[in-house]
């Protein structure tokens, strides 16, 4: 398992590939329109492209996905641990209809903090155990 931070020039040179991958999960997205204030990350499994996410304005997790053939290998949780080690106060938005996504984020200690109609905001909540 590996997380690679991608340079913006690399994204622009390979925008068709990334758009094709992202649009499998998020329709009508053009990565070229989201370069400003965004860091991009590739998730690899055994040197193969397995997923992707980006961080917008230092703490908003966006376009997080694992390609289906690589799911259930711990890659998503591995990526979340990476995110938690590199940014403060991360959060994301998930469609209410995406029950798998909501369950995934809750499993990784995110809690619903806002209900915006058909979208939920989830924020990371550090769970403390009292001795």
Image (tube, rainbow, N blue to C red):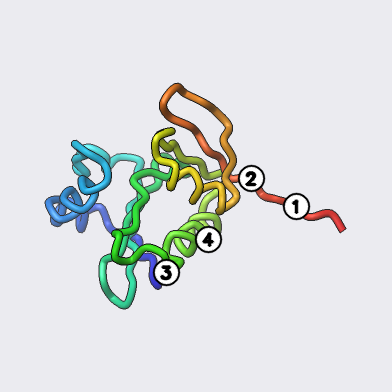
Please give the residue where the numbered disc 3 appears in the rendered image: 73
Q: SS at mark 1?
A: loop
The 10 Å Cα crowd at callout 2, few under 14, some 14 to 19, many 20 or more, is some
Residue at x 44% of width, y 42% of height: 99
Q: Specify which label sits upstream in the sequence, 3 or 2.
A: 3
CA–CA distance between discs 3 and 2?
Answer: 24 Å
What residue is shown with label 4? 81
Q: Which of 49/9 is in front?
A: 49
Per the rendering, the mark at residue 111 is none
Q: Is residue 11 left or right of residue 50?
A: left
Q: Which comes before the other along the chain, label 3 or label 4?
A: 3
- Label 1 environment density (alpha carbons within 10 Å; few <14, some 14–19, many ≥20): few
Viewer-nearest residue: 62 or 114: 114
Mark 4 or mark 2, earlier in chain: 4
Vertical placement of residue 68 versus 90, above or below? below
Task: Label 3: state its secondary structure.
Answer: loop
Position in image of residue 84 (x %, y %): 54, 55
Gap between marks 1 and 4 measured at Cα = 17 Å
Q: What x and y, as percent, mark residue 59?
A: 48, 43
Sequence-earlier tag: 1 or 4: 4
In terms of depth relative to the viewer, which is nearer, 11 or 91? Answer: 91
Local crowd size for mark 3, using a 10 Å CA cut-off: few (<14), some (14–19), many (≥20):
few
Circle 4 SS class: helix
| Residue 22 x/y as whole percent | 24, 48
């Amino acid at each position: 398992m590996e997380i690679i931070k991608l340079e913006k020039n690399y994204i622009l040179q390979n925008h068709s590939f990334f758009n094709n991958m992202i649009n499998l999960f998020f329709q009508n997205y053009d990565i070229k329109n989201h370069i400003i204030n965004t860091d991009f990350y590739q998730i690899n499994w055994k040197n193969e492209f397995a997923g992707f996410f980006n961080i917008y304005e230092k703490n908003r997790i966006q376009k997080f996905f694992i390609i289906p053939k690589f799911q259930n290998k711990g890659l998503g949780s591995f990526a979340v641990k990476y995110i938690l080690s590199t940014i403060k106060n991360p959060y994301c938005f998930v469609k209410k209809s995406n029950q798998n996504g909501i369950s995934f984020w809750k499993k990784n200690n995110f809690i619903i903090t806002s209900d915006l109609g058909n979208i939920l905001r989830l924020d990371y909540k550090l769970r403390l155990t009292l001795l």
